Amino acid sequence: MLAVYPGSFDPITNGHMDIIRRAAALFDQLIVAVLENPTKKPLFTVEERKWMIKESIKDIPNVQVDSFHGLTVEYARQKGAGVLVRGLRAISDFEFEFQLAAMNHKLHPEVEAVFMMTNTKYSFLSSSAIKEAASFGGCIRDLVPPIVEEQLKKKFSELGRANK
Ligand code: ADP
């Protein structure tokens, strides 16, 4: 069975990595699909985000990286995926995910949504918290893959220089 794990991944965190490893163990193939969402103002371009994911999943053989725009469930159907994987961190994620899954089910009932509970170590972890911490020079070493730590440092030093 092919599964798609969609998201913004701006940037990928160890919370995402944990879901990827667990989903890769459950499904034959997993596509990590980066959403090109023009309404969110991302820190990293889609190409940068894909590159950081690729570098971080090198040791997991059945995972690929792709990007898409438009409806997630439509993308999953086009790829022939039977499952959409999403992670749940807290009750606050539930309401949004519940609505999304209901809409997706209405559009394409053949694509099943599978929710994976966060590892409690990462229940507080989000890409936006990481960006905020990194922008103020906080230590994020155990929370993101090494390439992300490196690229965040680079990005914020470039932005710092641009604002001077
Ligand atoms: P989106 O904009 O689609 O929410 P994100 O990149 O923020 O994109 O998240 C992608 C998916 O990963 C979502 O299902 C989200 O709930 C899940 N996720 C994000 N952070 C974590 C975490 N720390 N633990 C488990 N799941 C997570």
Image (cartoon, rainbow, N blue to C red):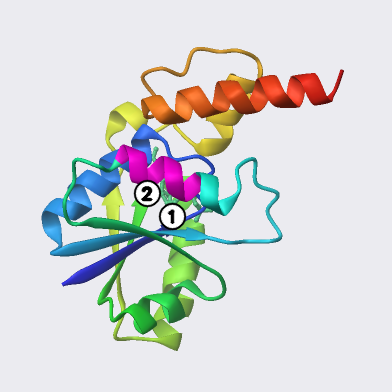
Residues packed near mark 2 inside 10 Å, few (<14), some (14 to 19) or many (20 plus) = some
Residue beneath the point at 62% across and 61% down = 37
Viewer-nearest residue: 146 or 8: 146
| Badge 2 amino acid | Leu
Question: Would residue 164 appear left or right of 131 to someone viewing this image?
Answer: right
Under tag 2, what secondary structure?
strand
Please say whether residue 41 is one of the residues in the magenta stretch. no
- The residue that mark 1 highlights is 94
How far separated are the C-alphas under marks 2 and 1? 7 Å
Give the numbered dot on residue 88: 2
Q: Residue furthest right?
A: 164
Q: Position of residue 23 (x, y in %)?
A: 21, 54
Q: Is residue 90 visible?
A: no
Under tag 1, what secondary structure?
helix
Viewer-nearest residue: 138 or 68: 68
Rendering quarter of residue 109: bottom left
Is there CB contact under 8 Å for labels 2 and 1? yes
Q: Main secondary structure of the magenta part?
A: helix
Range covered by the magenta-colored residues: 49-56
Mark 1 CB near ligand 1 (8 Å cut): no
Rendering quarter of residue 13: top left
Q: How many labels were placed on the picture? A: 2
Mark 2 and mark 1 lie on one chain; the one further toward the N terminus is 2
| Badge 1 amino acid | Phe
| Quadrant in which the C terminus is drawn | top right
